[in-house]
Amino acid sequence: MGIYDDIVNIVSCGSYPNSISQADIENGRSDARNRVIANVFKELGLIEQWGSGIARIKSSCLEVGLKEPKIREINDFVDVEFYRPDGEKVSDSIGLLEQEEKILEFIRNNSKITSKGVEELFQVKEARARRILKEMVEKGLIGRLGGGRNTYYV
């Protein structure tokens, strides 16, 4: 990984599977290298849908005003370049992710939020919503109150 003034570069060992081309990657086609691990991740809710990751990465960058990242295979590596903003301030908050900022803003305006509220706010599944909230609690950004169905965050 390299962090530069204009890009953040991530290099992953290993090329695309033999059955996948650069055009396939850009069109959202995927192929699991290890189906057992892939199925475990799917069951745990760590992946939502096969082949949606690249498109979601690109749309996430565009949503926050960044250029679409460059993803390419170079020899036995996959190289991803995320373009940094041109002299723009990424966030007014110190190192907060955009989702965390939105949750904090929601809490400021509504005094609390539930995992269901996070699901609706970001159109994510329950497991992802709970993970976001758990990480925010661990960082000390929010507090968890109540229990079970009555759990909420302030």
Image (tube, rainbow, N blue to C red):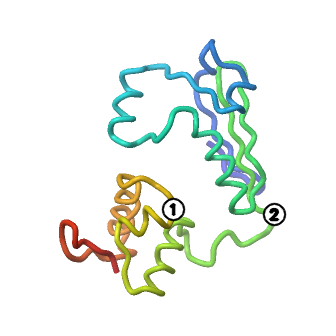
In the image, residue 18 above or below residue 103? above
Q: Nearer the viewer, residue 22 or 49?
A: 49
User: Which residue is under mark 2?
Assistant: 86
Quarter occupied by the N terminus: top right
Nearer the viewer's eye, disc 1 or disc 2? 1
Would residue 47 be found to the left or right of residue 88 on screen? left
Q: Residues within 10 Å of mark 1 (few under 14, many from 20)?
A: few
Would residue 110 be found to the left or right of residue 77 on screen? left
In the image, residue 30 above or below residue 114? above
At horizontal 20% and vertical 75% (from top left) the residue drawn is 146
Residue 106 appears at what percent x and percent y? 48, 79
Mark 2: amino acid:
Asp
Disc with the residue nearer the chain's start (1 vs 2) = 2
At horizontal 63% and vertical 21% (from top left) the residue drawn is 16
Classify residue 54 by image quadrant: top right
Q: CA distance from mark 1 to mark 2?
A: 27 Å
Classify residue 31 by image quadrant: top right
